[in-house]
Image: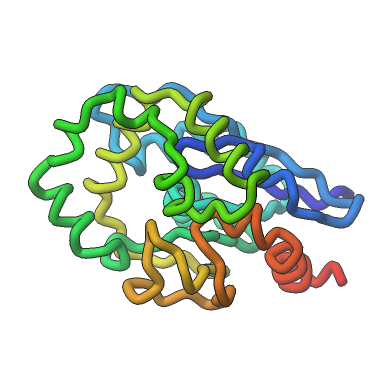
Amino acid sequence: MAIKIYFISGLGADRRAFKKLIFPPDCELIHLDWIPAIKNEALESYADRLAISIDTSTPFYLIGLSFGGMLATEIAKKLKPLHTFIISSTPVFKELPWYYRMAGSLSLQKIVPVSLLKRGNNIGLKFLGATTREETALLKQLVIDSDPIFMKWALTSILSWRNNERPQNLTHIHGTTDNILPIRYNKPDITIEGGGHFMVYANAETISRLIVSKLGLI
């Protein structure tokens, strides 16, 4: 029987963010692509609707990147995967930087123009963790292809998120140079030295090895 692994990408990204991860051939890799958000929908509610696509009749694993890690956390609380991995993310809202939580309490994200969310300049891409031409090109394309309305909703849902429960069987992998979610606010299980927010791509070999080892597949 194939080992089912479900993936949830980060905000402003899609399945391409995971394309450098390598798994054994007996793994069935399933990407949970974005579905439209409902106006004023909470992150937890969106996670419930996204999880409808998961086949719970057989055991499965869950991997979430950044915003996708928060969604994976909510899904894991209810569906109990064999194991959940969150990358460049956080399982609880108290590990979000204080300035994000302050912005959320003031609803500052709601005044950001939608057009601004589509601007993928090179400085911003480096802040996201792009260090090579290939990484910069992919991140820029992901930003161009993203839905700004969805991005604005997602920002609001993140800043309104109040989860305090860390699910069982969860491994949090985080980079030491993550500018989006600085590690000093986090308590990860595994740290990647020099890893930025986009390390799922830039450090894919290391992260693949860590996950596959945790799954007992090597």
Residue 44 occupies quadrant: top left
Image quadrant for the C terminus?
bottom right
Q: Position of residue 162 (x, y in %)?
A: 25, 55
Q: Position of residue 91 (x, y in %)?
A: 41, 62
Q: Is residue 118 left or right of residue 126?
A: left
Q: Which residue is pictured at 26% across the width and 63% down the height?
A: 97
Give above or below for 4 relative to 110. below
Tally of marks: 0
Q: Where is residue 216 in the image (x, y as percent from the top left)?
A: 80, 72
Q: Which residue is pictured at 74% across the width and 53% down the height?
A: 21
Q: Position of residue 133 (x, y in %)?
A: 64, 45
Give above or below for 32 relative to 178. above
Q: Which residue is pictured at 31% across the width and 67% down the height?
A: 95
Q: Which residue is pictured at 57% across the width and 77% down the height?
A: 193
Q: In this view, does 75 lie to the left or right of 42?
A: right
Q: Which of 107 and 135 is in front in this view?
A: 135
Residue 211 occupies quadrant: bottom right
Q: Which of 78 and 109 is in front in this view?
A: 109
Q: Which of 87 and 145 is in front in this view?
A: 145
